Amino acid sequence: MTARSRYHITTFGCQMNKADSERMAGVLENMGLQWSDTPEQADVILYNTCSIRDNAEQKVYSYLGRQAKRKHHDPKLTLIVAGCVAQQEGEALLRRVPEVDLIMGPQHANRLQDLLEQVFDGNQVVATEPIHIVEDITKPRRDSSVTAWVNVIYGCNERCTYCVVPGVRGVEQSRTPEAIRQDMVLLGQQGYKEVTLLGQNIDAYGRDLPGITPEGRRQNTLTDLLYFVHDVPGIERIRFATSHPRYFTERLIRACHELPKVCEHFHIPFQSGDNDVLKAMARGYTHEKYRRIIHKIRALMPDAAISADAIVGFPGETEAQFENTLRLVEHLEFDLVNTAAYSPRPGTPAAVWENQLEEEVKSDRLQRLNHLMSQMATERSHRYAGRVEEILVEDQNPKDPAQVMGRTRGNRLTFFPGNIAELQGQLVPVKITEVRSFSITGERLPAEAVV
């Protein structure tokens, strides 16, 4: 243990980053450091960064600048930049912010202790070289005592023309089904009720693992994994993210329908509703295929909640092509679409194309898509009115101490009156009395109420 006794982690970006931060927090606590609620009270500050959008990257530099100034007065302060910006920028980040002590890419999260010990010995360290990701040797410090992330596949082999992820997170590396199940068994023993299986491209799970069935089908797919872990004691709900339409299969849909613990919630990015734009993005599917996936899900699970990601203003996108995206959103009635205006990212093919759109055009299209999505989300929410939903209680409502909050199986955020000390981690029947675009409110029913 060092004299540096308190740490703080700020996490930017996706669920993968949140899971990585929990793992790194576990490493730091194993080293004897204690969590600090604010970076100002911490001796070790770690920024786990995201480079998927330019504004997220610039926010990191803003935060770093404040702490770099502080380090001039407190040289014992240790600054760490982890994650995708660290991988993307490498030593160039040191030239911009020389006060940083450690730069480490996402693949090095499990090596944090070794790297930090080098820093404490007086070295400035950059760890961005590709490595094989070893199994976790320390347990994460989880932000929740009810729900947990479990990584099943790291990296991504896709080559979408707008995306930095393959360059910063490396090639696909699947964990073994046995290691994943072992993690879930431990979580069940610790009282966790819900697990989200994580992968940058989770439908690619297992294609780097050996195994072919007698019928010639590849074993160790995501579908096989769901059957393998479904009976883990104590785990009541299973989710997975993020899916890629190119690899999303009817067999997976049927497994989700057959397995009671798998929630009726799917996050499947479509990115654009126009085939020419999808081709320019190198997504590897058409909007017709995407629609067929959603229709197959709803044929078996009519009430399934479906969320997605979309990019507007991709280089060369015409008004007519953008309107195809609007039509897809309107026809498929998503519960939620995470939207973004295209942002050129260093090292990606699309960033250097000459047919970039004006920021005003991108902003206008983003506003129009968000307006439509808000209308659609409100309409989708109305189906909850008057229904009884099973809510897994996660925490107290931060805006109303008299209420608790949790989620439906379809991942809809739900509030209702209750005592968090009594209800945390419980599955509670709730009658929905008020609906909003992205959350609902209800009243608790007796435990024997039918959901």
Image (spheres, rainbow, N blue to C red):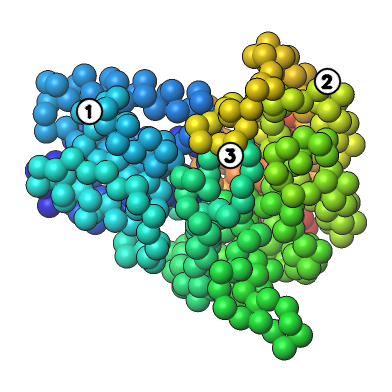
Q: Which label is found at residue 163? A: 3
Residue pointed to by mark 2: 319
Of labels 1 and 3, earlier in sequence is 1
Question: Can the viewer see residue 74 in this picture?
Answer: yes
| CA distance separating discs 1 and 3 | 27 Å
Image side of residue 373 versus residue 59, left or right: right
Q: Amino acid at mark 3?
A: Cys
Q: Secondary structure at mark 2?
A: helix
| Residue at the extreme top of the image, as rendered | 360
Of labels 2 and 1, earlier in sequence is 1
| CA distance separating discs 2 and 3 | 23 Å
Image side of residue 66 versus residue 361, left or right: left
Residue pointed to by mark 1: 98
| CA distance separating discs 2 and 1 | 45 Å
Residue drawn 74% across and 54% down? 246
Residue drawn 51% across and 36% down? 347
State the residue in front, 347 or 307: 347
- The answer to whether the residue labelled 2 contacts the one labelled 1, judged by CB atoms less than 8 Å apart, is no
Question: Can the viewer see residue 427 in this picture?
Answer: no
Residue drawn 88% across and 46% down? 288
Q: Quadrant of residue 126?
A: top left
State the residue in front, 317 or 184: 317
Of labels 2 and 3, earlier in sequence is 3
